[in-house]
Image (cartoon, rainbow, N blue to C red):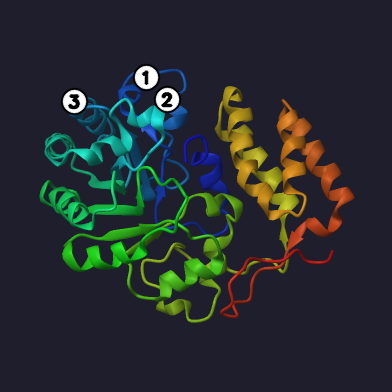
Amino acid sequence: MAEISHRALRELIESFGGVDEYFSEMLAAGAVTQNGIFESYYLDAGPVPEKFVYQICGVNKEQLACAASFLDKKQCKGIDINMGCSAPAIVRTGAGAAWLSDIEKSAEMMRAVRRATKKRLSVKMRIGERDDFEYLVRFCTMLENEGVEFITLHPRTTKEKFKRRARWNYIDELQKILGIPLAGNGDISSAESLYNYAISGKYHALMIGRFAVKSPWVFAQVKNMPQNNKIQNSAASELCPDLATKIDLEGIACYFLDLLTRYQPQEFFLSRSRRFFTFFSTNFKWGEYLKNLLFRETTMQGMRSVLHSYFNEHPQEKFLSPVNFTGSAGHPAPAES
């Protein structure tokens, strides 16, 4: 979630009632302590620091331990080590998912990081280079033995990207073995799928990435579904009092641009807005067309003008009706204006 899980997005999600925890975008451990001109934006734990987790990515134990020691002094819920990023440019450096290939080396690194911080220590990871459940068990057991208190598993190998379905059965089986909480991540692409995972009672926690950008209201939506009293450790921390009769998509898009202007430096406006609209535009029938128009703009005002023109031309796209759960798969359909 690089360039997207920053404060502006967190403020947007919080406006719908919020979540139990927010994770930062992947932070380069070597840059965290350098006091660069943009580091204050990367390290901004708002709007709710007590629910915020710093996620760091690094190539060696010294780098990661130094970053953990630095972040230990900040108000936050915890520090997370990224072992899930499978981008070739990251893996080639020895960071991200590259750690999964060597249990002993990773154990030494986790030991160093554990000594460097008293905050809750967690790991976000994939299965590994190969589909090998026994190896995954040994790796996760090592993490638990080295003081990791929480694991988020995206159950795909490092080379699969999103080519095949996530192996949620691996999460089910791991929870029977480990003595620490395990969060599931992957293929949650509708309010219904989040709801069904939540009320199953199987999982300590659930993590959502891209779908929360497309539908930042999804957590409140799930809390409004039947039997929400059964949801333990749910995504939403509080029930949003009343979801609007219609969700104003134009209003949300413009509000995000306002938040971006308020909480990010001007140098980040284009990259962050484009990342957001890559996902948010998929709400619309003509979403690819809208995204391309937005990407041509170089100012926030230009993007607002594009949004206004688009919804004038396609008024039926402006609103979504909140889902009333029926047990069927799918996503909200555009409401007639």
Residue receiving disc 2: 39
Say which quadrant the C terminus sits in: bottom right
Question: Is residue 240 in view from this perspective?
Answer: no
Q: How far apart, in angstroms, are the residues tagged by discs 2 and 3?
A: 20 Å
Q: How far apart, in angstroms, are the residues tagged by discs 1 and 3?
A: 18 Å
Residue 21, above or below 4: below
Residue 194, above or below 312: below
Residue lying farthest to the right in this orientation = 313
Q: How far apart, in angstroms, are the residues tagged by discs 1 and 2?
A: 6 Å
Q: Which mark is residue 255?
A: none
Residue receiving disc 3: 62
Closest to the observer, 167 or 4: 167
Neighbour tally class for label 2: few under 14, some 14-19, many 20 plus, Cα within 10 Å = some
Decide which of tag 2 and tag 3 comes sooner along the chain.
2
Amino acid at circle 3: Glu
Residue receiving disc 1: 35
Q: Residue at x 35, y 22 (%)?
A: 31
The answer to the question of whether label 1 and label 2 lie on touching residues, with beta carbons closer than 8 A, is yes
Amino acid at circle 1: Asn
Which corner quadrant of the image does residue 302 belong to?
A: top right
Amino acid at circle 2: Glu
Q: Residue at x 72, y 69 (%)?
A: 245
Q: In terms of secondary structure, where does tag 3 sit? A: helix
Where is residue 34 shown, x and y percent of the image?
Answer: 34, 18
